[in-house]
Amino acid sequence: MTATPTSSAPETTTPNPSSSTPSSPTPAPARSADISGAELVLRVLRDEGVHHVFGNPGTTELPLMQELAGQRDIQYVLALQEASAVAMADGHARITGRPAFVNLHAAAGLGNGMGALTNAAAAQVPLVVTAGQQDLRHLIHEPVLAGDLTGLARATVKWSHEVSTRTELGTALHQAFRVAQAPPAGPVFLSLPMNLLDEVGPPPPRHTEIRYAAGAPVDDLAALLAGTPRDDIALVFGDELARNAPREGLALAERLGAPVWGTGWPATNPFPTRHPLWRGYLPTHVPGIHEALAPYRLVVIAGAQPFSLYYPYAPGPLLSDRTQVVQITEDPSAPGRDTPVDMALHGQLRPTLRELLDLIPAGQQAEQVPDTEGPEGAAEPSTLDLPSVAEALASTLPDGAIVCDEAPQAARHIRAALDLRRANQYQWVAGGLGWAMPAAVGVSLARDRGAVLCTVGDGAAMYCPQALWTAARLELPIGFVVVNNREYRVLKDNWQQRDPRPSRLLGMDLNRPAMDFVALSHSMGVPARRAASAEDLGDVLADGHRTGRPFLVQVDL
């Protein structure tokens, strides 16, 4: 790629001697090593190990798009809506553990992506999100789609900044990747004015590699564990452990013979789900959490957000007064946020747990116990209901496939049915709907076009169905399963908790007109079928996975 200015660079003009207005000095000729701002962006991406750019382009992104078109090592992944682009990057970053890169279009595009940004923030997913800003020389005139991009993004990101000069562009980009990755991880935002992407200047500064390996002191925790009977110890593992120290978490549980719970609103599974020490996910309300952990004298938490509360509100305390609480996390602000903590250890989970394992003796592994989230009753083989749907999904899941789940009514049954052999194999929406279908695209790309099962409710499927088109365009092996009950069932259940005999359930039904997800899928280029029975569902899923391409199944309950 040439290092000399192209026709897209700002023109050098000759001052008019007769003009009464003072003229700007003529810019110095570009040095041979100078590059455009757009090429600088790609150099930083390569330095940071980025192989995909997720986005939906507009005029303010054209300099970057033109630079991307002239190379082959970074793939542009086209989403048809900005929320889909952000969610694709979210799925990608969850699997790689590294920041994914997103490019959105000006104020409107950033606005479209805000819902997906709240999900990434809730799940502490590292993203570098950029949006094209109008030419800085235009901003005084308030051009179309310009705006306070950094202010718009600030509520959902760790750091928000608008690049103001070509000189700072490389520094700002490298800083964005560092901030996104630094514990606690999360999305950051950069506004990239269009003229700075055209302007030529020096290459970016050298990449700075930061290695996070500081463990917390564990001598006091080891002594506490040694002085507590093994039957009185419980473990709570969060997303932080699932992503950063799953093997060490497994080894700790087995060394102690202690039962393991996941957080009630998990972004991922922290533990193998058929392991005899696995007890499932905690409830998302205070009474349920209290009841699950009250029998234990010592609860050791590994992760930043152990006790996710959802609905309904109930007063505390979360844990019994007789229970001691220890929390290990990379987030210094996390301990004490959910519940009072008796011992807070701030450090990287992997080195912390490895040192702890060196200090505690081996113990007896617990007996096999039934899952706490199992289906409430066995279904007839031919019945198409939530337990039978979950069993069909689990029995046909390809080896090593990742599951992206956004089917709230079916989630409990799906989690109970899945035999997940490793942590971080199950991904769950961390906030608002519309995440799973595009996230599945990012997950598959992160695993070099690996197999993904994406389960969504009918309501969730209508938020980002454009992801089907991207999956078809890239021919990714993703099975989309729409569990269609033609209603917002979870909301109906919550409504009826407040009013057991409602005269009317406003805004809860999706049946007039009924939605045809098979037709929708076909329109996006993805083959689709309906399943009429449990046996039929199993056959359709097996056939679809064998194709190695995207497919959709509509399951009418």
Image (cartoon, rainbow, N blue to C red):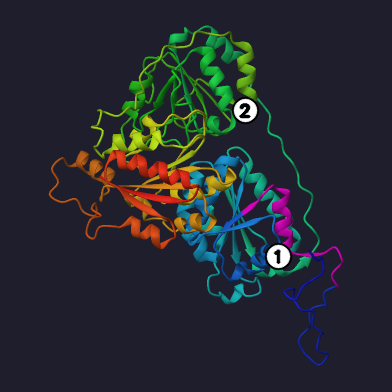
Q: Residue at x 71, y 69 (%)?
A: 198
**Is 222 above or below relative to 384?**
above
Residue 535 versus residue 165 in the image, above or below: above
Tell me if residue 64 can be seen: yes
C-alpha gap between disc 2 and disc 1: 43 Å
Report the magenta residues as a range: 29-52
> Against 471, is 255 above or below?
above
Horizontal arrangement in the rendering, residue 328 relative to residue 217 (left or right): left
State whether residue 373 is above or below residue 90: above
Q: Where is residue 516 in the image (x, y as percent from the top left)?
A: 30, 57
**Front in this rendered view, residue 247 or 354:** 247
Of the residues tagged 2 and 1, which is closer to the observer?
1
Q: Name the residue under label 2.
A: 347
Q: Which residue is drawn at 48% across and 35% down?
A: 268
Indicate the amino acid at tag 1. Gly
Q: Which residue bears the numbered disc 1?
A: 70
Q: Where is residue 362 in the image (x, y as percent from the top left)?
A: 56, 9
Residue at 52% x, 8% y is 363
Asked if residue 45 lies in the magenta stretch, the reply is: yes
Q: What residue type is labelled 2?
A: Gly
